[in-house]
Amino acid sequence: MKNFITIGTFDGVHRGHQHLFNLLETRAALHRAKPLVLYFALPPKTLQSPHPEMTILSMPDEKKGLFKKMGLRTEVLDFTQVRSLSAQQFFNRLLNHFQCAGLLVGADFAFGKNREGSAVFLREACGHKNIPFEVVPFYKEGYEKISSSLIRKLLAQGNIAQANAFLGHPYELTGRVISGHKLGRKLGYPTANLDTGIYKILPLGVFAVKVRVGTKIYDGFCNIGFRPTVNTLNTILPLVEVHIFNFKQSIYGRKITVWFFQKLRDEIKFNNLEELKSQLAQDKHQAAQYLQRVIFP
């Protein structure tokens, strides 16, 4: 059986992408083909940018996990292998290697060298091969076009609730626990400091979060910023610190996943550590109160 295909980066795997995937499954069934999602693990724009820091909503493992939850058949496209292909060469690869029996793409999609593979090219190429082709309009919520760029903007504004609504799932990040200055432990609020790499978008502030360690999920709060009270950072990237409620395990070197549900406040500079400690107590109480109402997963 051949494949009915969609192609893209699908950063965030948001509700617009989910709408396209639902249509893909419908069209594939109609044409007696199997739905297949071809995607780039990292956005080509990021790989080509001189400043790729904090530009990605979903890292490769996170995106793979989201696809798996949706039950999608997927294959990763290697950008280094296809970036120099002409539109016709790329189309031939779809026909021969991926057994394409139909193509469904988003409104802003183009592929091939210099993005030669426009909708006009694809419609004509598919017509010559008698293959169904469809361009799916942007998915809208009211008058708002749901897009990865809009969600990035909402995260930068700290609007977690709206970002999650457009994503269709809580914003998440996965990182490896690294050693820190252990200031949180001294204050009575030990934190797991996370290395999330340079690409991942990190919203600034303090947030109510859920945290997965191994197979268990805990409540917590997360601070992302530059620690202005103690000023111990010498980096352009913010530090991710997660306080996990009722948790005493040593998890250095392990990967954990954090889901964001609500922004509690901006990061601020305190006059002393006692003020900071008092605020952390309020953050914990506020996060706990909010997370009591959250049903997850």
Image: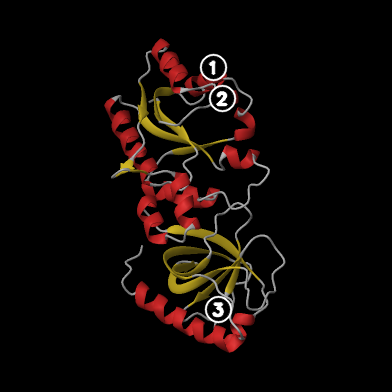
**Neighbour class for label 3 at 10 Å: few (<14), some, many (≥20)?**
few
Q: Name the residue under label 3.
A: 249
In this view, the residue farthest toward the right is 234
- Return the residue nearer the eye: 55 or 104: 55
Give the label, 2 or 3, closer to the camera. 2
Give the percent coordinates (x, y) of residue 119: 44, 22
Which quarter of the figure is the N terminus placed in? Answer: top left
Question: Which element type, helix, strand or loop, lies under badge 2?
Answer: loop
Amino acid found under the numbered disc labelled 2:
Gly
Asked whether disc 1 touches disc 3, contact meaning CB atoms under 8 Å apart, the reply is: no
Q: Name the residue under label 2.
A: 112
**Neighbour class for label 2 at 10 Å: few (<14), some, many (≥20)?**
some
Amino acid found under the numbered disc labelled 1:
Gln
- Return the residue nearer the eye: 178 or 162: 162
Query: What sort of colour scheme is used for the picture?
Result: secondary structure
Q: Name the residue under label 1.
A: 88
Examine the image and state in which quarter residue 48 appears. Answer: top right
Q: Residue at x 50, y 79 (%)?
A: 247
Task: Give the mark nearest the N terminus, 2 or 3.
Answer: 2
Q: Which residue is drawn at 44% across and 57% down?
A: 171
Give the percent coordinates (x, y) of residue 169: 38, 55
Examine the image and state in which quarter residue 296 appears. Answer: bottom left
Question: Which element type, helix, strand or loop, lies under badge 3?
Answer: loop
Residue 195 lies, with reference to residue 247, above or below; the image says: above
Tell me the CA gap for discs 1 and 3.
Answer: 55 Å
Tell me the CA gap for discs 1 and 2.
Answer: 8 Å
Asked whether disc 1 touches disc 2, contact meaning CB atoms under 8 Å apart, the reply is: yes
Q: Residue at x 59, y 53 (%)?
A: 54
